[in-house]
Amino acid sequence: MLGYHLLPTTLGSFEEDIEDGLTSSQFDLNGNLSENDARAGLKNKEEILKIMRKHKCTFDQARLIRQQNLLKKNNIDPLTGLPNDPKFVSFGSVTDQDHGGSASSSS
C-alpha cells in the first residue's frame, strides 16, 4: 500500500479522555461513548494535556491555544486566519485595517 498513514502513538479510548478532563460542553465526548465509537480516542491528547498543565487552563482553552500555535507555526495570523505572507493578495472586503495595518481612503 502506497502513501502515508498515521500510526497511533498510544492506544486509548474516549472513556479515558473523559476521565482525563478532555471533554466539555463545546466538545462533548459522551456522544462517542453512547454510540459505542470504536476509535482510540482523541489525537494529540498528550499535547492538549501538556498545555492544560502549563497554562492551568480548561480543555477548550487548551484546544484554542494549540490551534493558534499551529496557525502561527504555519505563518497564519491566529486572529484573522489570514496568511502573514507579504505576497498575500485578497480580493474581498478585508482591508489593511482589518489585518492590523492602517487603511486610507481617498474620497
Image: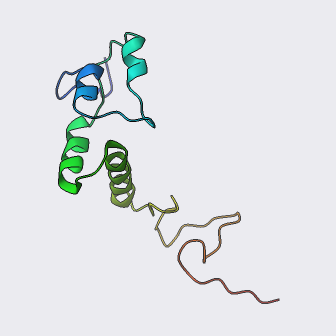
Residue drawn at point x = 34 percent, y = 33 percent: 23
The C terminus, quarter of image: bottom right
Q: Is residue 104 left or right of residue 52?
A: right
Image coordinates for residue 82, horizontal then vertical, percent: 52, 61
Image coordinates for residue 17, horizontal then vertical, percent: 26, 28
Residue drawn at point x = 38 percent, y = 25 percent: 29
Residue drawn at point x = 69 percent, y = 64 percent: 91
**Number of residue marks:** 0
The answer to whether 45 is drawn above or below residue 96 in the figure is: above
Q: Quadrant of residue 11?
A: top left
Image coordinates for residue 79, horizontal then vertical, percent: 48, 62
The answer to whether 66 is drawn above or below residue 25 in the figure is: below
Q: Is residue 57 left or right of residue 107?
A: left
Q: Quadrant of residue 94?
A: bottom right
Residue drawn at point x = 36 percent, y = 60 percent: 72
Q: Is residue 34 left or right of residue 59?
A: right
The N terminus, quarter of image: top left
Q: Nearer the viewer, residue 66 or 107?
A: 66
Q: Residue furthest bottom?
A: 106
The answer to whether 14 is drawn above or below residue 43 in the figure is: above
